[in-house]
Image (cartoon, rainbow, N blue to C red):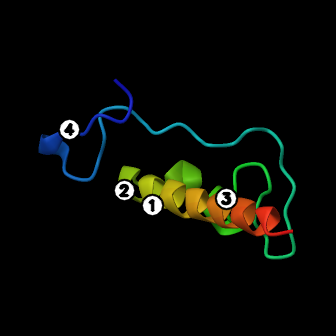
Amino acid sequence: MSGHLDVEKGDDLVDDISSPCVRNCCLDNAEICLGCFRSLTEILLWNRATQIQKREILIQSRSRKDSREAALKGF
């Protein structure tokens, strides 16, 4: 089961968290991908990130996406 925590392994998950990449890569001026909303640094870190780091990256990218969508609705 993807995303299920294994308590005995501490910060690792039983299953690896899949990349949020949607193959629509285009960076904005702040180096944020307009497809997955990860920063360039987060994209480069992904393959060596811990499961906790990956969860944090997903939280940040979701926040960026939500902010961008809210800003676009204001126009």
Task: Tell me the tag on residue 65.
Answer: 3
Q: Quadrant of residue 19?
A: top right
Residue occupying the far front of the picture: 74
Q: What amino acid type should be assigned to the residue bearing mark 4?
A: Asp
- Front: mark 2 or 1: 1
Q: Which amino acid lies under the numbered mark 3 shown in the image of this protein?
A: Lys
x, y (%) of residue 33?
A: 77, 58
Image x and y of residue 28, in percent: 86, 67
Q: What residue lies at 26% left-to-right and 53% top-to-bottom? A: 11
Q: Nearer the viewer, residue 35 or 14?
A: 35
Q: Secondary structure at mark 1?
A: helix
Image spot of residue 8 (x, y percent): 12, 42
Rendering quarter of residue 70: bottom right
Q: Residue at x 43, y 53 (%)?
A: 55
**Sequence-earlier tag: 3 or 1:** 1
Q: Which mark is on residue 56?
A: 1
Secondary structure under badge 3? Answer: helix
